[in-house]
Image (cartoon, rainbow, N blue to C red):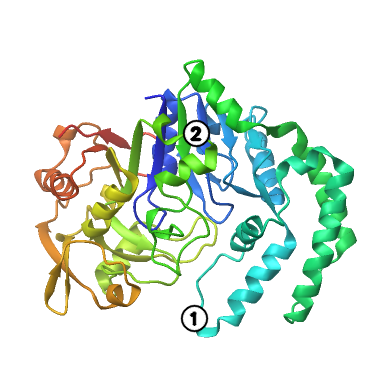
């Protein structure tokens, strides 16, 4: 498949990095198409953990050209910290390409993020305070500074100075602490010079790659239900992680995309506020959190946990035109006597099979569960479908039956090779 999109089918943290790492074997370009450094992708290789926030996961393969495309907002301190980490561990980033059209994050974006969240009081969104939303807002207001501006050092410095001076007034009026303009101009001018060799017209790069027979993998940050348009608004991110965002965020047309892989855990998690129909507040929820090590890669915040929600998953299939699913972390359910899967909703006693479009309705939904016997078996060493217990197979088959697309990969552990190819 020349172009494959990998998208999270829940609220993020589904294990996309592991699947991207697996698919990278057969692709020459791995491209990040949206989001910023507010989401982390974690890959475990030979017991070593690589937590990546901006550099695409495919960087761990020598044959892959990693690309940060135009739809991403880039925090330069984070980018260079990540590059330095990778190179100190023997992974070269010389082939990394950063779109000249990608917008940059600056300290005033983080100041605005903090001020805005503080002003919400008890109605906080749970933002990571990394300036992602304000950077996208500046992009929409047409006052953003793009990566390509760094090619002209004098103009770059002038843009930073003018923008920081203007933003300082707004920050001061909102009661925030004004920024040191000279310090920001100096620091970002240095980083801009370091960025310049990585800059590329990534749209032409990717189209030329396809014309030459290359295979391109597009990876999103966050996930379907954090999408600005299709997620549980306002508890969403500021961009479009859904598959449609892959075209806008890379410049590849919709007809260039052949394959859309949705990633889902065998249960559901969420970080921050917002509705969560299958959320558990009992010992089962605590067990999922503890056994699954459910803490945010970037923030360290504990994730809320619940049973797998197939109403959500069906909606994700529709929104993204998913061609297949990768089901991760099935091994986390190994110790349960029984496991549950939400197959429908009930609202005031009325059955609902479609995902509601109203936030207040979502808050009132009751999940309808199908309860299955657990397998009470350690599956982490299993590499063939035939090795799985019958109860685990039944779990996967229900997922396929209810959502209407095949499960192709099943994750059974944290390591890079802890997976099996499922043949239904």
**What residue would you read off at disc 1?**
123
What's the CA distance linking mark 2 and mark 1?
A: 38 Å
**What residue would you read off at disc 2?**
252
In this view, the residue in front, 272 or 353, is 353
In the rendered structure, the answer to whether residue 359 lies left or right of residue 218 reads left
Can you say which quadrant of the picture contains the C terminus?
top left
Q: In this view, does 237 lie above or below 46?
A: below
Which is closer to the viewer, label 2 or label 1? 2
In the rendered structure, the answer to whether residue 211 lies left or right of residue 74 reads left
Asked whether the beta carbons under mark 2 and mark 1 sit within 8 Å of each other, the answer is no
Q: Residue at x 11, y 47 (%)?
A: 394
Q: Is residue 47 visible?
A: no
Local crowd size for mark 2, using a 10 Å CA cut-off: few (<14), some (14–19), many (≥20): some
In the rendered structure, the answer to whether residue 276 lies left or right of residue 242 reads left
Q: Residue furthest bottom?
A: 122
Q: Give percent across and percent down for residue 309.
A: 24, 59
Q: Which residue is drawn at 58% across and 47% down?
A: 72
Q: Is residue 332 visible?
A: yes
In this view, the residue in front, 383 or 136, is 136
**Disc 2 secondary structure class:** loop
Q: Is residue 94 above or below residue 52?
A: above
Local crowd size for mark 1, using a 10 Å CA cut-off: few (<14), some (14–19), many (≥20): few
In this view, the residue in front, 368 or 78, is 368
């Amino acid at each position: 498949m020349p172009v494959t999109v990998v998208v999270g089918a829940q609220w993020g943290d589904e294990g996309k990095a592991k699947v991207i790492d697996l698919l990278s074997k057969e692709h020459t370009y791995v491209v990040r198409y949206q989001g910023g450094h507010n989401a982390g992708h974690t890959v475990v290789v030979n017991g070593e953990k690589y937590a990546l926030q901006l550099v695409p996961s495919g960087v761990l393969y020598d044959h892959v050209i990693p690309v940060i495309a135009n739809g991403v907002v880039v925090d330069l301190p984070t980018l260079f910290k990540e590059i330095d980490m990778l190179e100190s561990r023997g992974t070269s980033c010389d082939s990394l390409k950063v779109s000249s059209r990608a917008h940059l994050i600056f300290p005033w974006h983080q100041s605005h993020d903090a001020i805005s969240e503080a002003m919400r009081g008890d109605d906080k969104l749970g933002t990571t305070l990394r300036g992602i939303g304000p950077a996208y807002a500046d992009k929409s207001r047409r006052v953003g500074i793009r990566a390509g501006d760094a090619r002209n050092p004098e103009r770059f410095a002038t843009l930073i100075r003018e923008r920081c001076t203007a933003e300082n007034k707004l920050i001061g009026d909102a009661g925030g602490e004004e920024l040191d303009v000279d310090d920001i101009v100096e620091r970002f001018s240095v980083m801009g010079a370091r960025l310049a060799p990585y800059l590329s017209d990534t749209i032409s790069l990717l189209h030329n790659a396809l014309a030459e027979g290359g295979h391109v993998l597009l990876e999103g940050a966050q996930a379907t239900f954090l999408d600005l348009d299709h997620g549980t608004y306002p508890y969403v991110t500021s961009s479009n992680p859904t598959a449609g965002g892959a075209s806008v965020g890379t410049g590849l047309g919709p007809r260039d995309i052949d394959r859309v892989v949705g990633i889902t855990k065998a249960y559901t998690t969420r970080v921050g506020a917002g509705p969560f129909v299958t959320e558990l507040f009992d010992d089962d929820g605590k067990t999922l959190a503890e056994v699954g090590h459910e803490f945010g890669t970037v923030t360290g915040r504990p994730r809320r946990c619940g049973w797998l929600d197939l109403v959500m998953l069906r909606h994700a299939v529709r929104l993204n035109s998913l061609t297949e699913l990768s089901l991760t972390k099935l091994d986390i359910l190994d110790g349960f006597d029984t496991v549950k899967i939400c197959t429908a909703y009930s609202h005031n006693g009325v059955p609902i099979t479609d995902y509601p479009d109203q936030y207040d309705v979502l808050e009132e939904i009751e999940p309808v569960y199908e309860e299955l016997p657990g397998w009470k078996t350690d599956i982490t060493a299993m590499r063939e479908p035939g090795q799985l217990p019958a109860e685990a197979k039944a779990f996967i088959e229900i997922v396929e039956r209810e959502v209407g697309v095949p499960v192709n990969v099943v994750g059974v552990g944290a390591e890079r090779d802890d997976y099996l190819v499922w043949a239904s």
